[in-house]
């Protein structure tokens, strides 16, 4: 028996080489303030929720709220700073929710933010889709 | 037990997860400033200590014990102070552990219900059981 799933929302890949799956997110340092809206790459190799790059840290000056060890492709126990940010992604019902974002070399959305959902990497249309 | 493990245990007992200056270490442990400078440098090289510039006085350095290093420093003082928390993410407020959990985001949300963001510090005690993996 085949199972069909329909796409509920798709985002175009960000134009890296090769193009990468992405979602549009608004990230702000405090709940009541406007933030920065940008296409953030979805990285299924990242098991956390969200990572922000130095440019965003410099622009938003979020509160630094800790430091944890993470495992990278080549090392374990790499210490990474945590920053308090409020994230909105209305299409998946995330509205100004607080997250402890990792300080990283790139902005990333990880698996934890899209868990308990089916998703599709449509590399024919260069889209990233969430499924019903 | 090496002298560095012993120093980590003494600093943990004295400061817990609170930030401290080299002068406070010299006073608390009764050590000469030159020795303290070397000791803190050695602890930092091992990643058992983090340091940041004091935002109020740029020339001053503020240190904080890295509780994640507790897995490497498996001494009695460390076990007695952190044993119940090893492998967990912990919430520190004023240097004291006030909550723990396996999930950083849930820990943060609980923290923000009770504390101001400036009071919150999240880290892990020892190596976390659910370590975050990053592909880069």
Image (cartoon, coloured by chain):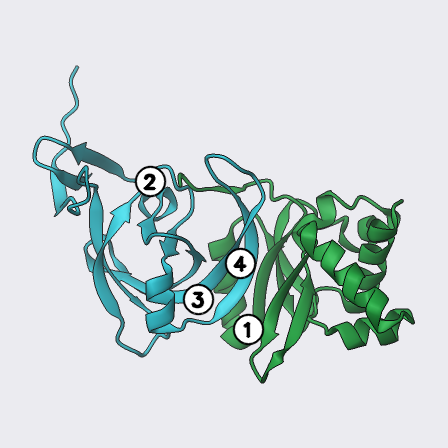
Chain colours: A cyan, B green
> Residue B59: x percent and y percent?
62, 79
Q: Are marks 3 and 1 in contact (CB under 8 Å)?
A: no
Q: Which mark sits nearer the N-terminus, 1 or 4?
A: 4
User: Is A16 left or right of B110, judged from the image as shown?
Assistant: left
Residue A84: image tag: 3
SS class, disc 2? loop
Q: Which residue is mark 1?
A: B114
State how far apart marks 3 and 1 are (Cα). 15 Å
Q: Which mark sits nearer the N-terminus, 3 or 2?
A: 3
User: Is B12 left or right of B58, judged from the image as shown?
Assistant: right
Label 2: how many residues lie within 10 Å, few (<14), some (14-19) or many (20+)? few
Are callouts 4 and 3 both on one chain?
no
Q: Are marks 4 and 3 in contact (CB under 8 Å)?
A: no
Are callouts 1 and 4 both on one chain?
yes
Residue A37: image tag: none
Residue B111 or B38: which is nearer the viewer? B38
SS class, disc 3? strand
Q: Which residue is mark 4?
A: B107
Q: Are marks 1 and 4 in contact (CB under 8 Å)?
A: no
> Residue A8: x percent and y percent?
13, 44
State how far apart marks 1 and 2 are (Cα). 29 Å
Occupied quadrant, residue B127: top right
| Residue drawn at 70 percent across, 64 percent down | B17
Subunit bearing disc 2:
A
State how far apart marks 1 and 4 are (Cα). 11 Å
> Residue B36: x percent and y percent?
82, 66
Q: Which residue is mark 2?
A: A116
User: Is A58 left or right of B1, judged from the image as shown?
Assistant: left
| Residue drawn at 37 percent across, 70 percent down | A58
Subunit bearing disc 4:
B
State how far apart marks 3 and 2 are (Cα). 24 Å
């Amino acid at each position: 028996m085949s199972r069909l799933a329909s796409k509920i929302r798709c985002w175009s890949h960000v134009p890296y080489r090769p193009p990468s799956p992405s979602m549009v997110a608004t990230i702000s340092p405090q709940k009541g303030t406007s933030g920065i809206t940008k296409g953030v790459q979805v990285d299924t190799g990242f098991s956390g929720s969200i990572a922000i790059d130095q440019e965003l840290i410099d622009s938003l000056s979020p509160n630094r709220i800790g430091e944890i060890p993470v495992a990278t492709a080549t090392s374990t126990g790499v210490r990474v700073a945590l920053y308090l940010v409020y994230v909105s992604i209305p299409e998946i019902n995330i509205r100004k929710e607080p997250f402890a974002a990792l300080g990283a070399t790139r902005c990333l959305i990880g698996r934890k933010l899209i868990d308990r959902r089916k998703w599709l990497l449509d590399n024919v249309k260069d889209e990233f889709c969430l499924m019903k | 037990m090496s002298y560095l493990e012993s120093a980590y245990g003494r600093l943990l007992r004295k400061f817990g997860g609170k930030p401290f200056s080299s002068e406070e270490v010299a006073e608390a442990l009764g050590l000469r400033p030159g020795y303290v400078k070397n000791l803190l440098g050695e602890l930092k090289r091992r990643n058992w200590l983090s340091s940041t510039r004091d935002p109020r006085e740029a020339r001053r350095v503020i240190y904080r014990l890295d509780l994640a290093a507790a897995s490497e420093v498996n001494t009695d003082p460390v076990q007695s102070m952190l044993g119940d928390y090893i492998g967990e993410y912990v919430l520190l407020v004023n240097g004291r552990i006030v909550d723990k959990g396996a999930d950083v985001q849930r820990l943060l949300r609980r923290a923000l219900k009770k504390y101001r963001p400036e009071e919150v510090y999240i880290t892990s005690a020892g190596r976390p059981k659910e370590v975050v993996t990053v592909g880069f």
